[in-house]
Image (tube, coloured by chain):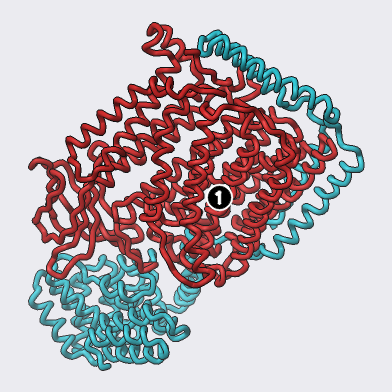
């Protein structure tokens, strides 16, 4: 609505520009070439008195300019009289053009080309909106919370809520929720591990004694529980026992089933042991993962994430890329990125499959297929 | 909402331009003051709407509104703010909008400040101005619309071409367009005069400030473009005779000729028809220049085929304005009254000589630029016309032109005395001879022509100084009187001398940098040192760095002169992930007017890196000279006597003191 109102104002201004001069009397005085020649004569006199030109030159110039002046004056007399105001009919005609043709024509062209239905979309508010896209989640959360307040013994309700708290970064609430779940529905290895992870989150990534005991309980229930093993390793690292951490993580890698999604995270954690006091970095992987690089908010988010969440994010980006390529397989750079990303994530089988898909999608373009083949060979994938 | 406001504002500007194309012409034919003054208000309001439109597009870029297609295609949210501004015109659509914005600025300026123009002339000028504007609005709206929208805006743009992510983009195109479009005013005045069938000395006086302003901007714009090419392209050259550069040189040559012939017309009422023709040609070449660069026809003649609407539209505009203008000229020019007479040896004669050389040089560039395109379009054969062609044709034309340059201003109007002038130039000759001898002695006879070039440069510079001395009577009359006369000189006289001096400075820079520069291409390992012209550069190692939307690998070099460290140079290679492009950023170190120029090649496996290192003596003078020329233009423009109708206006028929 505002848009059309402003359009109307602008149109009015344009119409005004046409109508206003029609209502004004013709300007009394306009410039003429006579003024120029008179000024030239003044100039000659001035130059003469300043000594810039000699008497003879000044006289010659004066004669020439005077001749021009006379000619111009003659021409002015011979010409039509001074311009007159417009006859009424011509003014009316112009007014009609300004009042009718201008707005109608402008609207017609604009409707042909413009997109008045599309609002402007500056990036900053859109990003904020995307960040607050969780708003609906928040309201859902409060509904569930209200239900649980009435019925606090609903273990399943808490179990639904806890991971949502984690995603929203409400770690303290998540800790409480997991404790309720364990109290109400009994402990399992996974629940203890999730409790531990919530505690780590609540303590800014530090594996406290509380958290460690939760992980250890989980391992007692299931010695192979991945998350707990990983965090016990982190705890060892944070205690300065690097050898122990490395041993735990190497063990995990040895036991890892093919295609386990967490392998890359563990590898990076292992690699990070060599550079003291840095959190496991996932940047190397994310570089290769996303199509034009991770966006600003992705990177900002990655900073706050636990290594595991980072791994998840990277896998999300890889999945997005894979989806995109499934729809449009002509982007050879995209394929190259995808194959590389799978290799970085340690998912050799998927890399192989992606290379095969790429060859199919790009069949017919020998040059592009050759690039895929070269990469595959370089990575040691089956041709 | 903002992009749509900009879009609608542009449509309204078109509407007003169409009205302004017709009403004032009717007014001028029917002697109807009301319709004639209509042009004033429509020109001003038209400018306001185009400004709104441009501001809206700028707002879209600055706020990364990716719902606008051109913003998505040419911008990135992580770009530094200045590049968000400059990417507005870093693409075809936006640059055309900048073009019409400047056109509207000039139109509004004529409407607002042209109070001294006769009513009919002003009305016709504004109408012609509006014909051009209408054609461009239509072109923009229907074939290059910057306001087309995307229904599902992406979250990130495709980034501005990395080569354009440079402060040069903030300065070069606006200056160049101010120059190109400034000539549209001269064109409009010429067409208006042809329609009126009347032309006289006063016409030249009215056109002169506009031509001067356009010429000044174009000079600065070309120099800026040359410097930009020099430091971005990584080859250390500053002029490549590339079609894009030639496209801006042609209007400059024609515009320079116009500037000089307009002086003859204003002061002596001669060369009138020739001046009109030059005004038409200067703008025609500006149009060709704009479109040569913008249409993509340079990268491939077949660009027209890939986007036929745009190509056909461009051809139609060129045909309409160039063809129309020349046809009108052919029809009406014979009816114009010829002006004053003059002897061959006279100031007028010198300016005719100047015009002959400039237009011939312009024709040479025109042929060298367009012949390969025409040949490719007709036969498919690809030939390249480059430096050698222009060195053989353009340079021999410019050398006599520059030799004659100091003579011109010293010759008297109507009939001159060449021997007398030569006598008065003795000092300049002496300066040239000394310069030649000193250069030969210092540099040897390896390149025999270059010292002569240095001599010519000094002759031109000294000639400009002699000109001012002669006019003020320095060394002839008592010092005090000379000083008083010097202050009494019109500023345009100083402008002329300054601009001529600037050309000499540019020539000096070109001769030195191209003849006595040194170049080394080596591969260095860390801690190794390379020497050039008395400087030692030590390679300290590679430093990876992160920019806002790129990553770069910088190589750090410590520069020593005689063992004393004088600074650090850090050339780099930047990679822009969004466009998967790499740019090379050369490092420059300015030592007085000379420069060290360091550009990176490829890094090799063993930690060594290939570099290109140049020492460019006096290279800065090349552009400094152009800046001095533009300053001369500004001085001339500021001459209050140019503003006719002001209390003390009018040019003087500058007579020389009797011998």
Q: Is residue A88 above or below residue A306?
A: above
Please tell me how crowded label 1 is: few (under 14), some (14-19), or many (20+) other residues with Cα within 10 Å.
many
Picture quadrant of residue B111: top right
Q: How many marks?
A: 1
SS assignment at label 1: helix
Residue at 58% x, 33% y is B262
In this rendered view, identify the residue nearer to me: B509 or B171. B509
Q: Can you tell which chain is drawn red?
A: B
**Residue B277 x, y percent position in the rendering:** 62, 43
Residue A92 appearing in the image:
yes
Residue at 20% x, 45% y is B446
In this rendered view, identify the residue nearer to me: B245 or B380. B380
In this rendered view, identify the residue nearer to me: B303 or B85. B303
Residue at 25% x, 57% y is B572
Q: Can you tell which chain is drawn cyan?
A: A
**Residue B321 x, y percent position in the rendering:** 65, 52
**Residue B309 x, y percent position in the rendering:** 62, 67
Q: Chain of mark 1?
A: B
**Residue A121 x, y percent position in the rendering:** 54, 61
What residue sits right under mark 1 in the picture? B285
Q: Is residue A170 above or below residue B87?
A: below
Q: Is residue B530 toward the left or the right of residue B128 in the image?
A: left
In this rendered view, identify the residue nearer to me: B250 or A102. B250
Picture quadrant of residue A192: bottom left
């Amino acid at each position: 609505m505002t848009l059309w109102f402003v359009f109307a104002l602008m149109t009015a201004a344009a119409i005004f520009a046409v109508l206003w001069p029609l209502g004004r009397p013709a300007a009394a005085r306009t410039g003429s070439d006579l003024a120029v020649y008179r000024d030239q004569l003044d100039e000659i006199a001035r130059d003469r008195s300043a000594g810039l030109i000699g008497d003879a030159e000044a006289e010659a110039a004066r004669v020439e300019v005077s001749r021009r002046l006379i000619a111009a004056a003659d021409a002015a007399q011979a010409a039509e009289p001074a311009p007159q105001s417009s006859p009424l009919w011509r003014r009316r005609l112009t007014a009609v053009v300004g009042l009718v043709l201008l707005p109608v024509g402008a609207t017609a062209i604009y409707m042909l080309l413009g997109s008045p239905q599309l609002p402007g979309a500056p990036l900053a508010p859109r990003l904020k909106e995307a960040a607050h896209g969780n708003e609906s989640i928040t309201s859902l959360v409060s509904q569930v919370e209200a239900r649980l307040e009435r019925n606090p013994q609903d273990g399943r309700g808490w179990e639904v809520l806890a991971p949502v708290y984690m995603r929203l970064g409400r770690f303290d609430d998540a800790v409480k929720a997991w404790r309720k779940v364990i109290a109400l529905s009994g402990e399992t290895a996974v629940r203890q591990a999730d409790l531990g992870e919530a505690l780590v989150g609540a303590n800014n990534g530090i594996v406290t004694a509380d958290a460690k005991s939760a992980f250890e309980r989980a391992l007692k229930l299931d010695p192979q529980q991945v998350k707990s093993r990983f965090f016990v390793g982190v705890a060892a690292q944070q205690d300065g026992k690097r050898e122990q951490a490395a041993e735990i993580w190497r063990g995990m890698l040895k036991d890892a089933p093919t295609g386990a999604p967490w392998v890359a995270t563990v590898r990076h954690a292992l690699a990070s042991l060599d550079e003291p006091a840095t959190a496991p970095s996932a940047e190397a992987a994310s570089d290769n993962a996303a199509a034009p690089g991770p966006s600003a908010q992705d990177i900002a988010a990655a900073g706050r994430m636990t290594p595991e969440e980072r791994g998840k994010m990277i896998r999300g980006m890889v999945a997005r890329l894979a989806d995109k390529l499934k729809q449009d397989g002509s982007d050879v750079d995209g394929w190259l990125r995808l194959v590389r990303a799978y290799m970085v994530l340690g998912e050799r089988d998927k890399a192989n499959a992606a290379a095969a898909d790429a060859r199919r999608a790009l069949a017919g373009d020998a040059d592009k297929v050759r690039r895929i083949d070269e990469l595959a060979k370089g990575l040691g994938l089956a041709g | 909402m903002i992009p749509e406001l900009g879009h609608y504002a542009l449509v309204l500007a078109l509407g007003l331009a169409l009205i302004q194309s017709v009403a004032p012409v009717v007014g001028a034919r029917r002697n109807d003051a009301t319709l004639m003054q209509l042009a004033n208000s429509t020109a001003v309001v038209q400018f306001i709407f185009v400004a709104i439109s441009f501001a809206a597009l700028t707002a879209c870029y600055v706020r990364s509104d990716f719902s606008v297609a051109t913003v998505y295609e040419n911008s990135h949210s992580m770009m530094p703010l200045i590049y968000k501004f400059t990417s507005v015109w870093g693409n075809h659509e936006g640059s055309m909008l900048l073009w019409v914005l400047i056109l509207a600025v000039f139109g509004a300026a004529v409407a607002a400040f042209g109070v001294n123009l006769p009513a009919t002339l002003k009305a016709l000028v504004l109408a012609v101005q509006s014909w051009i504007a209408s054609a461009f609005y239509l072109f923009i709206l229907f074939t290059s619309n910057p306001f087309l929208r995307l229904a599902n805006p992406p979250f990130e743009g495709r980034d501005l071409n990395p080569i354009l992510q440079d402060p040069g983009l903030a300065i070069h195109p606006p200056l160049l367009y101010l120059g190109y479009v400034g000539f549209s005013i001269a064109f409009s005045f010429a067409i208006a005069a042809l329609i009126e069938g009347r032309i006289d000395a006063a016409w030249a006086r009215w056109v002169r400030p506009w031509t001067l302003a356009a010429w000044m901007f174009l000079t600065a714009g070309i120099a800026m473009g040359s410097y930009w090419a020099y430091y971005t392209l990584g080859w250390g050259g500053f002029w490549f005779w590339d079609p894009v550069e030639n496209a801006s040189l042609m209007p400059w040559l024609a515009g320079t000729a116009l500037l000089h012939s307009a002086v003859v017309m204003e002061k002596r009422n001669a060369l009138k028809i020739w001046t009109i023709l030059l005004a038409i040609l200067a703008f025609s070449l500006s149009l060709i220049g704009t479109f040569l660069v913008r249409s993509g026809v340079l990268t491939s003649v077949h660009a027209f085929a890939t986007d036929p609407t745009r190509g056909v539209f461009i051809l139609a505009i060129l045909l309409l304005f160039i063809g129309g203008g020349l046809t009108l000229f052919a029809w009406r020019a014979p009816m114009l009254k010829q002006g004053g007479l003059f002897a061959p040896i006279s100031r007028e004669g010198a300016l005719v000589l100047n015009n002959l050389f400039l237009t011939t040089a312009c024709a040479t560039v025109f042929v060298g630029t367009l012949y390969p395109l025409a040949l490719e379009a007709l036969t498919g054969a690809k030939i390249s016309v480059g430096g050698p062609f222009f060195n053989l044709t353009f340079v021999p034309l410019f050398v006599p032109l520059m030799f004659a340059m100091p003579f011109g201003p010293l010759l008297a109007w109507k009939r001159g005395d060449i021997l007398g002038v030569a006598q008065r130039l003795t000092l300049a000759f002496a300066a040239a001879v000394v310069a030649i001898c000193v250069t030969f002695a210092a540099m040897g006879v390896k390149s025999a022509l270059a010292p002569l070039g240095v001599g010519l440069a000094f002759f031109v510079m000294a000639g400009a100084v002699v000109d001012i001395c002669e006019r003020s009577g320095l060394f002839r009359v008592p010092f005090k009187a000379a000083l008083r006369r010097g202050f009494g000189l019109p500023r345009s006289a100083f402008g002329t001398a300054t601009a001529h001096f600037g050309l000499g400075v540019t020539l000096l820079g070109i001769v030195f940098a191209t003849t006595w520069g040194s170049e080394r291409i080596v591969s260095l390992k860390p801690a190794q040192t390379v020497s050039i012209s008395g400087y030692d550069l030590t390679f300290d190692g590679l430093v990876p760095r992160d920019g806002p939307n790129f990553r770069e690998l910088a190589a750090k070099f410590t520069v020593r002169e005689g063992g004393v460290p004088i600074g650090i140079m850090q050339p780099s290679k930047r990679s822009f992930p969004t466009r998967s492009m790499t740019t090379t950023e050369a490092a420059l170190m300015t030592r007085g007017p000379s420069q060290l120029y360091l550009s990176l090649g490829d890094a090799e496996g063993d930690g060594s890196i290939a570099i290109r290192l140049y020492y460019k003596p006096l290279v800065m003078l090349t552009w400094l000279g152009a800046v001095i020329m533009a300053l001369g233009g500004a001085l001339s423009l500021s001459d209050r006597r140019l503003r006719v109708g002001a209390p003390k206006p009018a040019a003087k028929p500058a007579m020389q003191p009797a011998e």
